[in-house]
Amino acid sequence: MPGPGMELIGEEEKRELLEVLEAGYLFRYGSPDNPAFKAKVYKLEQEVARLFGVKYAVAVNSGTSALLVALGGLGIGPGDEVIVPGYTFIASMSSVIYARAIPSLAEVDRTLNLDPQDVRARITSRTKAIMAVHMLGNPARLDELKAIADEHKLLLIEDCAQAFGARYKGRAVGSIGQAGAYSFNIYKTITSGDGGMVVTDDEPTYRRFFAFHDQGHSPLRMGVEIGRRPFIGLDFRLTELSAAVLLAQLRKLDSIRAHLHANKRRFKEAIADLPGLEFREITDPQGECATLLTVFLPSEEIARQVAKALGTKVIADSGWHVYSNMEQILEKRTITPEGCPFTCPYYKGGEVKYWKGMLPQTDALLARAINISIGVSDPGLGSGFGVTMRDGLAEVDAKAAAFRRVAQEYLR
Ligand SMILES: Cc1ncc(COP(=O)(O)O)c(C=O)c1O
């Protein structure tokens, strides 16, 4: 089973969905006078904004769309660089490329999120934004990244695709930068199969987000407007069907978090005394999602042996989320042969090069790291070993004991 929300699909989701299906109206816009219009997308946006303490939320059809809307809506485009971690899902980079800007790859540190020191070193006169990705449910070092962004007058965009519901020092992730983007695909905290959300506190930015996600239209239009569109948009709208499922899932968020935290605490305590074993640094232990428990082994060799014996992989070998395994990025495989945005005349940074080994700190950390699933079993994250959302403390104890047996053999 992929993510915690998907494991809990049940009667509540069925009821919400049936309400929409029985009413027979599936579009996000409708008249308040029409009893068939249930306004699920609108309610979801209002609920998320209230829960996360932001003024505006726009529901979209994926996390990738949410990132693209955030970038375009904030005016990032040709000639700009966006600093992105080398450990993330491809969408953090592909959205920048489709915004026609250049991803500048940076190191992660022991949080497995952006290393603020390295971010500082990569700022150029072309840098427009820092994209902080809260990988595996753990908030990035937002205090430091926000301070750097403010000091250099850069935008801070939070890619919260893997951290819906996480908090950083009391504030929801996504509410600290100028924009926050979330995903509702099947591996995420809550899900509707696919879907996304983008949030902001700034009204003009919200209007731009909304226009981008719906052909340039103003928020919550009713009917057709002529001649009022500020720019050309696209269609990233969410349907009432997805929003209905998400409203039911949203009501499960607190219990999902509580369950994951209890299981993670138990797993961690059961293996904490293993000599040479270290844990990933968590910036806010109460605030994180606790979807995964990431451990560092003393060397690459030991980590690979332990991972193999557990039937999983070290993160460096896990595939989708590591820059050095992204051939489409390393080779700058753009959709048309002109090579835009890498050949864009507005870009004045010279030739852009990505290569395996360009982020040695990231490579070294990921080669020693193993993800243990607490609530997300995703081969792309290398989390093939661990427990799932439906498992209780007995399963946690059994899996922790299995981990101990294997690790002890190689840690001797
Ligand atoms: C860090 C990160 N950013 C963005 C995305 C894109 O989200 P989606 O799959 O909904 O397009 C994902 C999805 O896995 C992700 O993990």
Image (cartoon, helix red, strand yellow):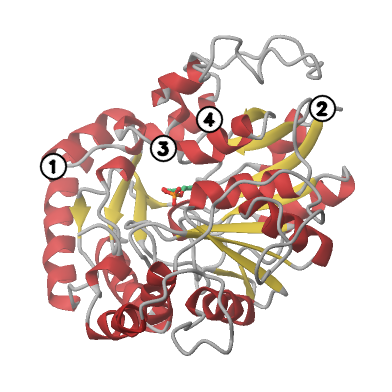
Give x and y (percent) for residue 224.
68, 63
Please give the name of the residue rendered at 15% of the width and 62% of the height, measured from the top-left corner: 399
Real-space CA distance between mark 4 and mark 2, rounded to the nearest whole angstrom: 21 Å
- Circle 3 is placed at which residue position? 321
**If the image is split into quadrants, where does the N terminus sit?**
bottom left
Estimate how packed mark 4 is, as few (under 14), some (14 to 19) or many (20 or more) residues with alpha carbons within 10 Å.
some
Q: Which mark is residue 361?
A: 4
Q: Which mark is residue 49?
A: none
Residue behind label 3 places its C-beta within 8 angstroms of ligand 1: yes
- Circle 1 is placed at which residue position? 311
Q: Is residue 191 above or below residue 81?
A: below
Q: Nearer the viewer, mark 4 or mark 2?
A: 2
Please give the name of the residue rendered at 45% of the width and 65% of the height, measured from the top-left corner: 239
User: Which element type, helix, strand or loop, lies under badge 1?
Assistant: loop
Q: Which of the marked residues, 3 or 2, is nearer the chain's N terminus?
A: 2
Give x and y (percent) for residue 180.
63, 59
Q: Nearer the viewer, mark 4 or mark 1?
A: 1
Real-space CA distance between mark 3 and mark 2, rounded to the nearest whole angstrom: 25 Å
Whether label 3 touches label 2, CB < 8 Å: no
- Circle 2 is placed at which residue position? 124
Real-space CA distance between mark 4 and mark 1, rounded to the nearest whole angstrom: 26 Å
Residue behind label 1 places its C-beta within 8 angstroms of ligand 1: no
Comparing 221 with 61, the one in front is 221
As shown in the figure, which amino acid type bears the numbered disc 4? Gln
User: Which element type, helix, strand or loop, lies under badge 2?
Assistant: loop
As shown in the figure, which amino acid type bears the numbered disc 3? His
